[in-house]
């Protein structure tokens, strides 16, 4: 009977309206605010994980463990991680879940990438056949991720910057570690010259030439299609302390004026490397 009383209301409900840019930005801000986690305790990470930019791991009040990327370890690291994780997800690629880590002593917040205890990585200094065995089923992700690295100017995408996470069906590949990308590689949005050497170039060359991974520019095209409202909303949703080392307005101007040129660079880079 309750359902029958509601049916006339449901039948005459106005169609859902597509949110405006402002509403979408407000929704995004609300989602960002839900990402804050308070650090309960923190320990040195060097005995647990590799990575030159990872110094600490933390336990959050949400009951999760996080890899901490702090301003003390590099002033542009947290904002580069923040923008990278948001960009990858907006372009259809997976990352670990992440949060803004707040400290009760008033220290600057850290970027927290949730630790995936069930996930695996390719071993250190792997032989070519080991790389092929680990990544063969993930070539569709590899083919999209490396051109997007060129777009974002991430020169340090080596094989251990991927996690293979088990699921009930097939394993999925997660991308992480943007500490040396974007603003960390040059103001305001990365210096393209950094992409002509380094781990990203070397590993993409192996995937492309040895494993025959085709360059797929779907993610790059999605990045270029993200308008300046998305970029500015995501950037300014970060903790204000993270914005202090970068030129915020110049970064917004770059996204407005030059993101399509950056997409063209990414396509050329992936085809030439």
Image (tube, rainbow, N blue to C red):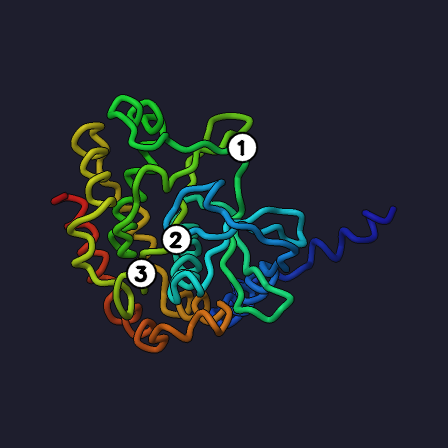
Q: Residue sitting at 81 percent across and 47 percent down?
A: 3
Q: Residues within 10 Å of mark 2 (few under 14, many from 20)?
A: some
- Left or right: 34 in relation to 259: right
Q: Does 87 sit above or below residue 95?
A: below
Q: Is residue 174 visible?
A: yes
Q: Does 56 sit above or below residue 253?
A: above
Q: Residue sitting at 31 percent across and 57 percent down?
A: 181
Residue behind mark 3: 182
Element carrying mark 2: loop
Element carrying mark 1: loop
Element carrying mark 3: helix
Q: Residue sitting at 55 percent across and 56 percent down?
A: 99
For the residues labelled 3 and 2, the Cα–Cα distance comes to 15 Å
Q: Is residue 15 visible?
A: no
| Residue 232 at x, y percent in the picture | 41, 70
Residue behind mark 1: 118
Residue behind mark 2: 53
Observer-nearest of 52 and 174: 52
| Residue 190 at x, y percent in the picture | 26, 63
Which label was assigned to residue 148?
Answer: none
Observer-nearest of 149 and 30: 149
| Residue 74 at x, y percent in the picture | 38, 63
Q: Is disc 1 in contact with disc 3, using a CB cutoff of under 8 Å?
A: no
């Amino acid at each position: 009977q309750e359902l029958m009383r509601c049916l006339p209301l449901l039948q005459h409900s106005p169609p859902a309206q597509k949110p405006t840019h402002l509403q979408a930005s407000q929704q995004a801000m609300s989602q960002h605010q839900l990402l804050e986690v308070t650090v309960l305790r923190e320990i040195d990470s060097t005995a647990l994980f590799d990575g030159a930019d990872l110094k600490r791991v933390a336990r959050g009040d949400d009951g999760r463990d996080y890899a901490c990327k702090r301003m003390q370890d590099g002033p542009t690291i947290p904002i580069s991680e923040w923008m990278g994780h948001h960009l990858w997800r907006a372009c259809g690629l997976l990352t670990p879940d992440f949060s803004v880590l707040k400290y009760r002593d008033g220290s600057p917040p850290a970027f927290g990438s949730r630790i995936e205890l069930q996930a695996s990585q390719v071993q250190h200094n792997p032989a070519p056949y080991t790389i092929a065995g680990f990544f063969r089923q993930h070539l569709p992700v590899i083919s999209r991720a490396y051109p997007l690295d060129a777009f974002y100017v991430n020169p340090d995408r080596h094989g251990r910057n991927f996690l293979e996470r088990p699921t009930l069906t097939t394993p999925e590949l997660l991308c992480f570690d943007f500490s040396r990308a974007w603003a960390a590689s040059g103001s305001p949005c990365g210096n393209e010259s950094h992409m002509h050497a380094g781990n990203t170039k070397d590993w993409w060359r192996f995937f492309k030439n040895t494993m025959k991974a085709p360059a797929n520019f779907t993610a790059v095209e999605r990045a270029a299609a993200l308008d300046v409202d998305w970029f500015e909303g995501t950037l300014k949703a970060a903790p204000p302390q993270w914005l202090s080392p970068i030129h915020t307005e110049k970064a917004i101007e770059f996204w407005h004026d030059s993101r399509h040129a950056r997409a063209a660079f990414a396509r050329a880079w992936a085809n030439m490397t």
